Every structure is written in C-alpha cells, then in structure tokens.
Image: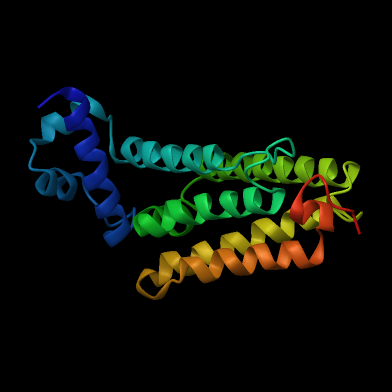
Amino acid sequence: MSREVRRAQILVVAKEVFAEKGYHHAKIDDIVARAKVARGTFYLYFGDKRAVFGELVEGCLEAVQDAVHMIDVSRTERTPLEQLTDNVERVVGIFAEDPALARILFNEAVGLDPAFDAKLVVFYDGLLRTLVRALEEGVSMGMVRAGDAQTRAVCVLGIVKEFLVRLALRPEGFDTSASVRTVVELISSGWLTELGRSGPGTTAQ
C-alpha cells in the first residue's frame, strides 16, 4: 500500500472516530486500532491528534470554498437561478454525503481552541465576502433587488449553516432536496428580479 493511500486511510478512520467520540474523548489508539496500523505508522504522517483533526477541518473548509462558484450570466445552458441552486446543492451535498464532516465542523471544531476559532472566523468571513460581492454585482446587473448586501449575506449563511447543524445532529432524517429547495425559494422570491431568475433576455422587475 502506497504512503498516499495509507495516509488517506488514516484520515478516513480518524474522521469516523472524531465524529463518534468527539475530539476530546477520541484517542490515537482508537484511530490506529480501527485503521489497523501501528502507532508508529500514525506518527509517520501526523504529529499528534490535533494535527490529524486540523487536516480534516482544513479539507472540509477547502471543499466548501471550492463548491461556491460565482454566478456567470454569460452562460446560456444554466440560468442564474439554476447556478445558485447548483451552489447550494454542492455545499449541502458535501455534508449530506458525509455527515461525519458536519459533526466535526459544527460540533467539534467550534471552541476547540483559539487557533481553530480564528480559522473558522477567517473561513466564514471569506464566505461572507463572496456572498456580498455576488449580491452587489447582482444589483448592478439588475439581477438582484437593491438592499443591504451584508445583512442578506449573513441571512443566507445562517440559513445554510442551520440546516447543516441539524444534519450533524440528525443525519438519518435530513432531507437534502427540501433543504436546497427552501434556501433557493427564499432567495428567489425575496431578492431576485425576473432577470436574476431567468437570465439575460428577460425583463427585470
């Protein structure tokens, strides 16, 4: 087994252990036992428990950032509203397909220590800036009704985050389609013009 495959295997197992036991109760011995590797093998890849946990959180944050794409009005095959739906589906889908990630990010990483808290603040601030920029550009192009972009961005992030927190707590009853549909309906009916919903070639309201 290659080093890359072994390392990935340890990360997958560590994610399961942290999600089940919580960060503070999880032990390196739990991880190596489930991964069927020697303790020394673990230390070939990770310096300690916090290092492997940190990599899981980093990977999760990067996946979310990569899932959010700016709306491109020049696209003819997907309307702005469909692109918005794609964004929400990608973000929610990351955690719906792997609820352990939701438990780690929203239950275990918050309040772990000042460094992790600072990392999460930077992450959420970055998402807010992306949302604000998208809303402001939407207003300038007639796709979004004029309004407070900062507050709107906070509302969107808060709605999506609450869905994901519920997913972390009760993954077995989580309805991904309903969650995505509700988020998109709220944005579409409240903020988007007809141009924002249908794309170029329509008349803005």
Question: How far across and how far down the image is residue 110, in percent?
Answer: 50, 53
Residue reaching furthest to the front? 201
Residue 197 against residue 14 in the figure, above or below: below
Image vertical order of residue 165 relative to residue 140, above or below: below
Residue 133 on image: x %, y %: 78, 40
- Residue 44, percent across and down? 19, 25
Residue 162's quadrant in the figure? Answer: bottom right
Q: Nearer the viewer, residue 59 or 174?
A: 174
Q: Residue at x 43, y 71 (%)?
A: 174
Residue shown at the point (19%, 30%) measured from the top left? 5
Residue 170 seen from this side: yes
Whether residue 108 is visible = no
Quarter-wise, where is residue 72 in the image? top right
Quadrant containing the N terminus is top left
Q: Nearer the viewer, residue 65 or 18?
A: 65
Image quarter hosting the C terminus:
bottom right
Q: Nearer the viewer, residue 133 or 177?
A: 177
